Amino acid sequence: MVSPVNPYSVHIASGHVNVGTASAAITVPEGYVYVIRDVSTRQVGGAGSSFWLRDAGGSGIFLLSVDTPSGTSGGHWVGDLVIPSLYTFTANAGGQGADYWISGYQLTVV
């Protein structure tokens, strides 16, 4: 039996972010929307850590946050966050640095 493959699922971004810095800007391609479905983090260090996605424009709005309790190795967020075409955001960390993986859907705007 062949496993079904979802043609809309994409790796949106991944990397490492240090405390007090932001990732490179992540921009939704023109003509598409992102539906972020899953964010996984792995903290770097032993203390509690937090991770968030933030608007890269002037507003600084927080889009989502993943908290990692002290003593655990990572955090996980699952949901449906819709981000419009050409919107730019960054990944950020507090407490400790974090590795992160963001996935979801890239859908065509009709």
Image (cartoon, rainbow, N blue to C red):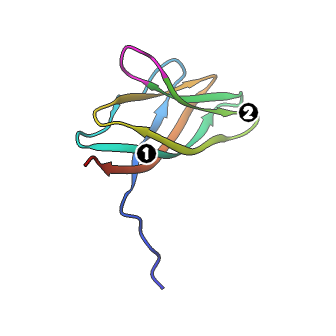
Sequence-wise first label, 2 or 1: 1
Q: Residues within 10 Å of mark 1 (few under 14, many from 20)?
A: many
Residue 24 in sight here? no
Q: How crowded is mark 2: few (under 14 residues within 10 Å), some or many (20 or more)?
A: some
Q: Position of residue 74 (x, y in %)?
A: 65, 40
The residue located at (43%, 40%) in the rendering is 82
Would residue 35 be found to the left or right of residue 49 on screen? Answer: left
Determine which of the numbered discs, if any, sits on residue 35 in the image.
1
In the image, farthest residue toward the bottom: 1
What span is in magenta? 55-61
In the image, farthest residue toward the right: 71
- The foreground one among 65 and 100 is 65
Give the residue type at disc 2. Pro
Q: Position of residue 19 (x, y in %)?
A: 54, 21
Would residue 99 be found to the left or right of residue 30 on screen? Answer: right
Q: Magenta span has 57? A: yes
Q: From the image, tell me which residue sits under label 2.
A: 69
The residue located at (42%, 15%) in the rendering is 59
The residue located at (68%, 41%) in the rendering is 73
The residue located at (58%, 40%) in the rendering is 41
